[in-house]
Image (cartoon, rainbow, N blue to C red):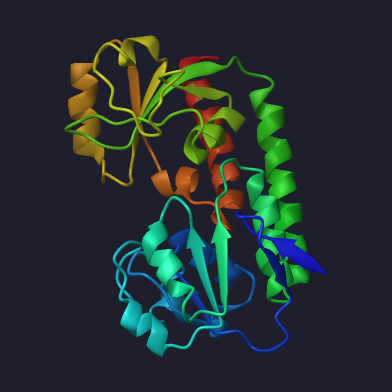
Amino acid sequence: MQWSDALGKAHLRYPGTPRIVSLVPSLTELLVALGLAECLVGRTGFCIHPRAVVRRIPKLGGTKGFDRGKLRALRPSHVIVNIDENRRDEVDALAEFVPHLIVTHPLAARDNLDLYRLLGGVFDRQEQAAALCAEFEREWAALAALADTLPRQPVLYLIWRDPWLSVARDTYISRMLAAAGWDTLPPASPLRYPPVELPAVAGEAEIVFLSTEPYPFRERHLRQLQEQLPATRCTLIDGEMVSWYGSRAVAGLAYLRQLRSRLAESAGN
């Protein structure tokens, strides 16, 4: 049996014990969830979950500008990369000495199911992958059931300041929020992370979310923004729960269900 990655490249089940380098933080977490911690021989400095497990795995730098020499010395059988998070030229250079490059590019929440099956199949962890798929489907159904009882809301999801940056609707983040019944602003953009003008765009939103990553928005930022936008509801949102795909998506769906329910109750919906 074979499985295809984001580029359509077919991958067979690996017959031996793999030596895996993950250059994608959320996929490092997924590989651990699939029971592959002992096969991970390299990671980026941003691969921080689960902390107790990854601290023993050598760091190679960032998702961009990683140390290719150190990576090569690890003699990986597989390197896991992502179209958005890694630079193509750096990934292409790995093909010179890495036997298997697995390219990922989840764009919507349900793309996680194929991601689980791909990595679970290649590394002979199909039972663990099937369990993750079942957990995902349960949380997806629970979120959908809640969202169906509430009106859809336009929201502004801010990931950066100076300038203020939001997310376009073709991003994974926006599609995760859409599953909870939240439609991000602006409704159309040629940029995946468009700059927005406050308070104009915020005036169209029922809720403005300040994400805790990539910009580390905290309570003081929330207070400042709420003062700037007194007529609009502003709240912090856990960026990892919304933007990290892989095994984190299961918890992310549950988090969004709880957040949507809490905000609806406090608003009297």
The x, y position of residue 96, in whole percent, is 46, 78
- Classify residue 55 as left or right of residue 10: left
Q: In this view, which residue lies farthest toward the front?
A: 96
In this rendered view, identify the residue nearer to me: 78 or 108: 78
Q: Is residue 236 visible?
A: yes
Q: Residue at x 45, y 62 (%)?
A: 24
Depicted 67 relative to depicted 30: above or below: below
- Classify residue 135 as left or right of residue 66: right
- Classify residue 30 as left or right of residue 57: right
Q: Is residue 58 visible?
A: no
In this rendered view, identify the residue nearer to me: 76 or 173: 76
Q: Residue at x 48, y 25 (%)?
A: 263
Quarter containing the C terminus? top right
Depicted 135 relative to depicted 194: above or below: below
Count all numbered tags in the image, as a single digit: 0
The x, y position of residue 108, in whole percent, is 59, 40
Q: Residue at x 66, y 28 (%)?
A: 146
Q: Quadrant of residue 72?
A: bottom left
In this rendered view, identify the residue nearer to me: 154 or 260: 154
Depicted 87 relative to depicted 242: above or below: below
Q: Quadrant of residue 219?
A: top left
